[in-house]
Amino acid sequence: MHNPKALVIFSGGQDSTTCLLQAIQTYGRANVQAITFHYGQRHSIELERAHWIAQDLGIAQTVLDLSLMRQITHNALMEEGADIQTAANGMPNTVVDGRNALFLMYAAIYAKGQNIKHIIVGVCETDFSGYPDCRDVFVKSMNVSLNLAMDYDFQIHTPLMYLTKAQTWALADELGYLDYVREQTHTCYNGVVGGCGECPSCVLRERGLQEYLAGNRPSEHILLHSLHNKSRLNAQTASKNTS
């Protein structure tokens, strides 16, 4: 019996690094790969951190160039000098339209070529910033669409979907990598090494860390959410197998 393999959509940030570490524990280092996307982000540190972490953890990494996105969409993550703002409707201008849809599609194409069925992405509904493509309903719809498009039984896993940032820090701690994630990952929208402490991403990250370090350790919630996600995936798989 072959061990299942997994592909992690990996940016070098807190969430995707935590997902990568969990995947290594779950599937074994030899069965995990990372895929990273150069989509025209204005700060190279994101790609540099992803490359360094993948090498440090001994994980094969593939980097795909999707920078053509700069030709068709505009946002604060891709435009030099753009100020990070939130519109009246609550939507931040850091939204990259269609980004996760493209990431999942290209990850799936690559995964099928590698005989990988498990795709892991670190999106989250709990502490998200209004990004529509971080919602559970979107990921589920993409999972169905990709399975139909390629006639392949992909299983997209979102282990952080219902975790707060504090719970994500707790998960990193349980994996034995709290300090590693704190020191080696990059999340800052402004591209500041170590974080600017002011952008929405830095504020969310630091607030979650301080909540966790203050003693609000939600380990039992992590276990419950993980079991919930696993049971739902098993139910979906069983349903597909009987249909």
Image (cartoon, rainbow, N blue to C red):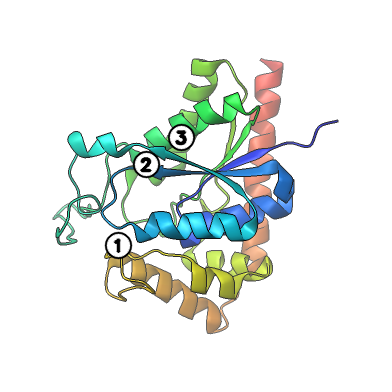
Question: Residue at horizontal 65%, vertical 21%?
Answer: 240
Q: Are marks 2 and 3 in contact (CB under 8 Å)?
A: no
- Towards the viewer: 139 or 59: 59
Residue under label 3: 104
Give the alpha-carbon distance from disc 3 to disc 1, as whole Å: 22 Å
Q: Earlier in the sequence, mark 2 or mark 3?
A: 3
Q: Where does the image place residue 87, in percent across and percent down from the top left? A: 15, 55
Q: Where does the image place residue 234, in percent across and percent down from the top left? A: 69, 35
Q: Which residue type does callout 1 highlight? A: Tyr
Left or right, 13 with reference to 216? left
Q: Are marks 3 and 1 in contact (CB under 8 Å)?
A: no
**Farthest residue toward the bottom?**
214
Question: Residue at horizontal 72%, vertical 55%?
Answer: 25
Residue under label 2: 133
Q: Where does the image place residue 162, in percent across and percent down from the top left? A: 52, 54
Report the number of discs.
Answer: 3
Mark 1 secondary-structure assignment: loop
Mark 2 secondary-structure assignment: helix
Q: Earlier in the sequence, mark 2 or mark 1?
A: 2
Residue under label 1: 189
Q: In the picture shown, does residue 26 fall above or below 138?
A: below
Classed neighbour count for the residue bearing mark 1: other residues with Cα under 10 Å, few (<14), some (14–19), many (≥20): many
